[in-house]
Amino acid sequence: MELFNGRPDNTEGRLPREIRTYDFLDKLGIKYFRTDHEPADNMEACNAIDAVLGVLICKNLFLCNRQKTNFYLLMMPGDKKFKTKELSAQINSARLSFAEPEDMLKYLDIEPGSVSIMGLMNDKEHKVQLLIDEDVLAGEDLGCHPCVCTSSLKLKTADVIDKFLPATGHEYKTVHLVGED
């Protein structure tokens, strides 16, 4: 794996959702680093990607309530354990579960394995509420996918909060996840 500054020179064979991500970031003047890789299906592969980017890639979970009337994108450190009960109490939403892949595609134009904050640029109706663990916000940089699981990005956290989110029309709620047994 190699670290690149910005978008790929050649976009042949890349999905339109990935190219739209680079277009959106470039339009906003957000600088980012990129690495291309095989889909990461285990922690060893994730750790290798983290090492190339020099950042811990966020764990991004797409959740919903039982009635499927509220959808949430949770960003948390990849090394924390997710506890539904811990989050439910903070957002006043009982019975959280993982949303269906078709909902992920419908609202974020993302498929399983590619969930990322970048998908919020596709949520024009603001159906998804962003939840960010305070430890993610404390980091200078964050790592995420550009709406595909075969590339990863490193961006300044401040750029995501101050430029990207306002451009998408999304706000976020800070959550505190302990993630311990």
Image (cartoon, rainbow, N blue to C red):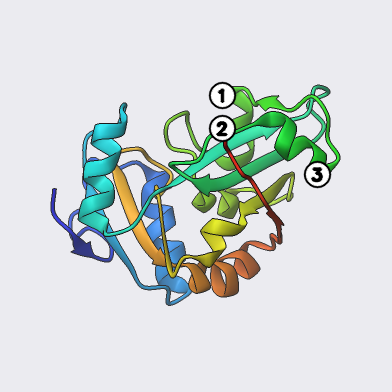
Residue underneath mark 3: 91
| Residue at image point 53% right, 51% down | 117
Q: Secondary structure at mark 1?
A: helix
Q: Is residue 11 visible?
A: no
Labels 2 & 3 near each other (Cβ < 8 A)? no
The residue indicated by pointer 2 is 105
Q: Which residue is mark 1?
A: 101
Q: Position of residue 61 (x, y in %)?
A: 56, 36
| Relative horizontal placement of residue 143, taking residue 47 as reference (left or right) | right
Quarter in which the C terminus is drawn: top right
Q: Nearer the viewer, residue 133 or 10?
A: 133
**Left or right: residue 19 compared with residue 136:** left
Three-letter residue code for mark 3: Ile
Residue at 56% across, 63% down? 137
Q: Are marks 1 and 2 in contact (CB under 8 Å)?
A: yes
Inspect the image, locate mark 2, and give the three-letter code of the amino acid beneath it. Leu
Mark 2–mark 3 Cα distance, whole angstroms, equals 24 Å
Q: Is residue 118 above or below residue 94?
A: below
Q: Residue at x 22, y 34 (%)?
A: 38
In the image, what residue occupies the spot 58% across and 68% down?
A: 161
Q: Mark 2: few, some, or many residues within 10 Å (few <14, many ≥20)? A: some
Which amino acid is tagged 1?
A: Pro
Circle nearer the viewer, 1 or 3: 3
Residue 45 visible here: yes
Question: First in sequence: mark 2 or mark 3?
Answer: 3
Tell me which corner region of the image, top left, top right, bottom left or bottom right, holds residue 107. top right
Of tags 1 and 2, the one toward the viewer is 1
Mark 3 lies on a secondary structure that is helix
